[in-house]
Amino acid sequence: MARSLVTIDLRALQANVRRLLKVLDGTELWAVVKADGYGHGAIDCGRAALEAGATALCTATLAEALELRAVLPDARLVVLGPPEDIAAAREAGLELTVADERLPEGVPLHLKLDTGMGRWGLSELVQPSREVVGLMSHLASADTDLLFTERQIECFRGLTEPYSHLTRHLANSAGALRVPGSRFDAARCGIALYGLSPFGEDPARDGLEPVLRWESELAQVKLLRPGDSTGYGRRFLAGHETWIGLVPVGYADGFRRDLTGTEILVAGERRRVIGTISMDALAVELDREVSSGTPVTLVGDGLLLEEHARVADTITYELACGIGARPERSRRAVSDA
């Protein structure tokens, strides 16, 4: 095995697409594959999502969309970020998002309204030009604040009702799963596509399957005597004889320094990460001596990325985007749909 192995299960991704489509009940699913598919691989995941019934792919940048266009010539591609090279977008057959009064010509547009997110978007809807094919906004707290979400929905509905012949899209993953009023004509789903919960819960609660699996192995096993330490800063001091295993994964691979204390699986058993996580390695506390080469699961087999996110006081989005599979450090495999 390489230092670690990241496996992307496209069968699980397609199951998530079908689950979302069932929940959406007629509303189109637009798969968000920005940031290289939240670290899962935009091309593989985008293609699989379309095959399972998604009707469009959404990116954050023109460059992301152009990379997809090179391998998906017929896909509907929507760039959610600010317009960049209009001519290049026009030539590639992309759709652009516009958040102010400047409406480019000769390219399909989606007008973005600010209904409470406080970021990109118009406060009032300008007269749509003939290039405008969609009206959109962005939910700020569909995962935590239903009352404010309902206010955003009603604001969006009121502003766009005169133009209901255009495609209206507001829902994100949280809205699509649990706020029916947010669904309108299309839902832009990202995190749920990858089997991660937008609510920080077990994704199985919403019928989702994790797509990413991350594995490694114990590179060395050693015994710490009382008073011995492991890692920078001597943050872990052995109070008694303690077996530890060293895993060749660290923050350069996306296993962050603030994940000390989280659990990983060693030969299928939960074990606590101890000491300071370094750039290239982490230490795990063992209950006995085991062999070097013993398999380690960092994400998978019931060990959820949501658990790591709670330890790091962050969200799964950030962790997933940070997991690296650069050939010189790790290996990435794709399990066919």
Image (spheres, rainbow, N blue to C red):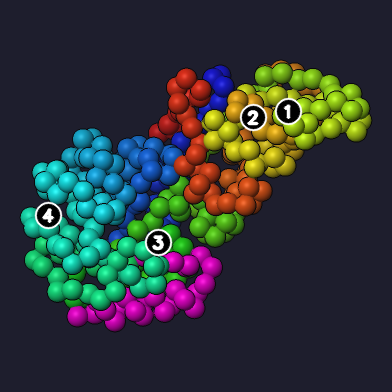
The residue that label 4 is drawn on is 107
Q: Is residue 194 above or below residue 245?
A: below
Q: Which residues are magenta?
A: 138-162
For the point 35% across and 51% down, which residue is it?
32
Q: Are marks 1 and 3 in contact (CB under 8 Å)?
A: no
**Helix, strand or loop at disc 1?**
loop
The residue that label 1 is drawn on is 231
Q: Are marks 2 and 4 in contact (CB under 8 Å)?
A: no
- Inspect the image, locate mark 3, and give the three-letter code of the amino acid beneath it: Asn
Q: Are marks 2 and 1 in contact (CB under 8 Å)?
A: yes
Q: Is residue 205 above or below residue 33?
A: below
Specify whether residue 114 is painted magenta.
Answer: no
- The tag earlier along the polypeptide, 1 or 4, is 4
Residue 194 can be seen, yes or no: yes
Give how far apart the Cα atoms at labels 1 and 3 are: 41 Å
Rendering coords of residue 266 (x, y %):
70, 31
Which numbered disc covers residue 172? 3
**Helix, strand or loop at disc 3?**
loop
- Inspect the image, locate mark 1, and give the three-letter code of the amino acid beneath it: Gly
Q: Nearer the viewer, residue 315 or 8?
A: 315
Residue 183 image-quadrant placement:
bottom left
Rendering coords of residue 40 (x, y %):
43, 39
- Inspect the image, locate mark 4, and give the three-letter code of the amino acid beneath it: Val
Left or right side of 219 for 179:
left
Which numbered disc covers residue 278? 2
